[in-house]
Image (cartoon, rainbow, N blue to C red):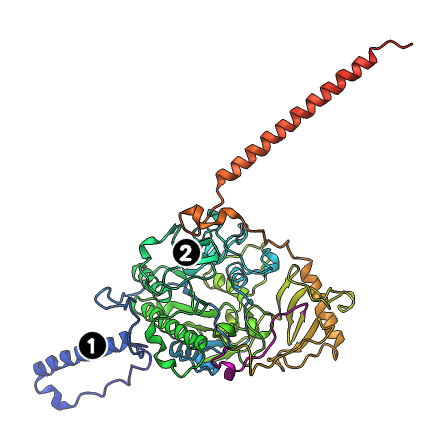
Amino acid sequence: MAPRGCAGPPPPPLPPQAWVWPGKMLAMGVLAGFWVLSLLTYGYLSWGQGLEEEEEGALRPQTGERPEPSITTISQPHLIFILADDQGFRDVGYHGSEIKTPTLDKLAAEGVKLENYYVQPICTPSRSQFITGKYQIHTGLQHSIIRPTQPNCLPLDNATLPQKLKEVGYSTHMVGKWHLGFYRKECMPTKRGFDTFFGSLLGSGDYYTHYKCDSPGMCGYDLYENDNAAWDYDNGIYSTQMYTQRVQQILASHDPRKPIFLYIAYQAVHSPLQAPGRYFEHYRSIININRRRYAAMLSCLDEAINNVTLALKTYGFYNNSIIIYSSDNGGQPTAGGSNWPLRGSKGTYWEGGIRAVGFVHSPLLKNKGTVCKELVHITDWYPTLISLAEGQIDEDIQLDGYDIWETISEGLRSPRIDILHNIDPIYTKAKNGSWAAGYGIWNTAIQSAIRVQHWKLLTGNPGYSDWVPPQSFSNLGPNRWHNERITLSTGKSVWLFNITADPYERVDLSNRYPGVVKQLLRRLSQFNKTAVPVRYPPKDPRSNPRLNGGVWGPWYKEENKKQKLRKNKTEKKQKKSKTKKKQQKAGSFTNCRLGVPRG
């Protein structure tokens, strides 16, 4: 089908002279028809190919591989969720970045930009909330990330998004970074609802070799196809391009008359800062080497998303698809990312850590080319996508997300009025925090953050709080100059901001509005009553890849569990037998004494 705007007005009626040689005119008409059709076909297939050249090794959809199918419309849309890693709030063209992102700009401009959109400040929490629709306090993942050596994963009693979509006939595929735990086989993506998985299990790794060292002597290979190490793909291909190839292959082999859910979790632009050489060409003017590398990585990612969109069109998915784009958290200035003009960075509860780049692009949107300023959180995708898929959410499941499709598509008010950013009871306590500072309602030494309508409250230690303007990216790195340094006031453990009026968190209102502070502290306390215990186990030495063929992967085996159970049973039996023997000895001794005659 030709792009929108290619269709012109109907042709004028033929003049009488045109009927003099009907045979000749008929032949000319047929030739003209073929000529127009060829032009339209060329225009259709060359959409978005404005970049200089196709990435090395990427698959460009060809008309010879598969003709455009005649699609019977299905009621369930194809769902494409693209998650970038560590992309800063400013790091997209339409937010004023010097980094060129023509694909993201175009898709966002033709869709709905989410300009009041929140995620979590680090990797695992955002991913867990997307796939379960629940806050961290309701899955036990409220502290830090799941580390490679921890016997921990997304709790198995949580129904995941792909599992719910499979119930209503969706084919489910994941490509990219998992980072939700893998210590046992039941934690793997293919056991959590995905028909296929191709990607990495850990939070980061080399983009070419796919190796990751968690600590000295703890190194291993981290590229999987389904449940096995993908050694066959160890060809030095840059992961952004390799993942795009896999997406293209999935789309090429899937019937567009059947609904598909594609979760594409790119590794980019997370450190280590690596990119193919040709993407550096446009950024030689950027002095700071980390920023230059980051820019090259983001340009490669932008081109990859163009190729994904092109594949959706080529293979007949696009017209019935919903594409959602999101970053998983804010950028890290020391690794090239920029959140300007927001405060803070990745790993913090300031806006720079949790306010994300996000948009929805779809022919199914009612209000295209708009900006949504309603409150949206990453947990909202779970009920929204299940509803779009015509699925069901069990009544007994307590979700923290809301169905916000009408908010995005039609511009209606968001059903969401608050966001619990997090409560982390084991994070380093603020030295100056106390119950007294929390009016006896809340211990302000605890790290927490909450948003209720226009108000945002932070307690404890919110993290690195500087503003890092673009000019700070000199050759020395964004650590030392031009930063607007903030020295937290002595005794400070509570902050209050009107985020609508002050999105950059420059004016603390906690002293001016103690009544509002108390209200938000009570709301925090209410949330905390529903929290489950934190899951953050110590390192397990059995996780070492050296013990698993040089591969990061499941190390907890059911055999170990059975052996432990048998051992425990044996120990219990031995204890019981020892106890019985002691009792028998004690009994015989007592009988002897009783048998002694008095006197």
Q: In the rendered view, does 521 fall on the left or right side of 501?
A: right
Question: Looking at this view, is 325 or 53 the one in front?
Answer: 53
Local crowd size for mark 1, using a 10 Å CA cut-off: few (<14), some (14–19), many (≥20): few
Magenta residues, as a range? Answer: 459-477
Q: Is residue 472 magenta?
A: yes
Identify which amino acid the numbered label 1 is placed on. Ser
- Is 364 part of what is drawn in magenta? no
Alpha carbons under labels 2 and 1: distance apart: 45 Å
Q: Which residue is drawn at 92% across and 9% down?
A: 599
The numbered dot on residue 222 is: 2
N-term-proximal mark, 2 vs 1: 1
What is the number of the mark on residue 318? none
Residue 38 circle label: 1
Badge 2 element = loop
Residue 127 position within the rendered picture, expressed as x and y whole percent measured from the top left:
51, 62
Nearer the observer: mark 2 or 1; the answer is: 2
Instruction: Note whether 571 is above or below 547 in the view shown.
Output: above
